[in-house]
Amino acid sequence: MRTWSLMYGLSQLVSGVASCFIAARIYNQEELRRSAVHFIFFFFFFYSWLWSFFRGVFFLDTFLSGTSLGYKPGDDNNYDGVLGLLDVAQSSDMTSPLLSCTTVLGDTALLACSLWILSMTAELSRLARTNMDRGPTGEHETSRRYCKWIHAIIALFLVCEAGYIIYHKGFNDRSYRILISGNMLQAITLVYVIYILTMLKCTGRNYETIDGSIVLSPVYKRIRSIMLVYITFSFQYQVISLILLYSHFNVHLPTMLIGVSRLLFNNSGTALSIVMGCSQECFFRSFHRYVPDEYVEAFNLSDPALVMTNAAAGYSPPMVNPVFVFTDIESSTLLWNLEDGAIMSRANEVHEEIIRGLLIQFRVYMINTAEDAFQL
């Protein structure tokens, strides 16, 4: 069906526009020169834009030419265009210079995206564990090291695939080996992402102290949101691709399942652009009608991360008979004299309930006292 090629092409071009916008925005930020994480973000979106552009050109050219690469008369497992680029592996011959060129460049850009995702996951997980960067010099050296080695791998892959295509004068039915290598790297990336999320959660690195309150780590939340989106939009496509490629397309899968998984994968750049590039202000202005009122009210009053976290957790100050505690000795003495100390006794109970509620997730904690102050 040419309809699948059209939908694939349009979704890839939309994803390319979103990725290009975020890459340009990061490029104009000063943090790009000082932070390895921002450096990795920029190159990920840059190659995501290239991948989306070349794939979009491939699908639109397929749609306009009316060709169906995967169609073989008399084959029971014909998918008639729904496979997208996997059609190349099922095709017996694809000698079009434009399609061959866009396929090679798209494969290379997709490999680069997987490599930068690996680097991004490693850097963000390190930040979650240490809560500090390497300093300006260390961050710059790390960025240079990533840039050198990743681009060396990209160049090697480009030369190998281009040489293969030139030697065979186009793609043929043995091209699945190239596609498998790219899909295997993406599968490894997905496994690594899942491992990092599990490791951070199991070691307690998903919490940290902000303004005296123990909340979910902002870095961990950033990692989780990015990686969950990446997994959601990529996992099912990678599984389906590996099944079809390793079985040499002898396994028949529902056409709609393949098409929807491919569309989700095509829009991964758009989804990641929204998650990684849109601010809270932009989100609440655009979708305030669809967000619970407590989130909107918390953001309108004050937008620090702690306020948003408390709104998500359901924390709110007491509305009836609030208790105020003063730490200086004179005020504390006066309060203890009121109602035979009932007010201060209740204040102590509330204080202990709060402390226990916040620290129950940890096995051990210690309280140090100094005059009228205490430190956890």
Image (tube, helix red, strand yellow):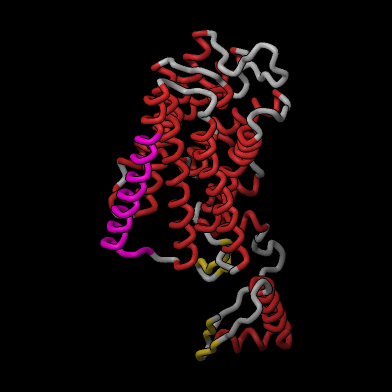
Residue 154 painted magenta: yes
Query: How far from the left and from the top, in percent, is residue 223?
Result: 52, 53
Q: Which residues are magenta?
A: 133-160
Residue 17 in sight from this viewpoint = no
- Residue 148 is left or right of residue 177, and the answer is left
Q: Image point 58% across, 23% down: which residue?
A: 90
- Residue 147 is left or right of residue 307, and the answer is left
Residue 272 in sight from this viewpoint = yes
Q: Image point 30% across, 41% down: which residue?
A: 28
Q: Nearer the viewer, residue 313 or 181?
A: 181
In the displayed orientation, state which residue is furthest to the bottom: 371
Identify whether 211 is placed above or below 149.
below
Q: Image point 43% across, 57% down: which residue?
A: 123
Query: How far from the left and from the top, in percent, is residue 110?
Result: 46, 36
Quadrant housing residue 363: bottom right
Residue 7 painted magenta: no
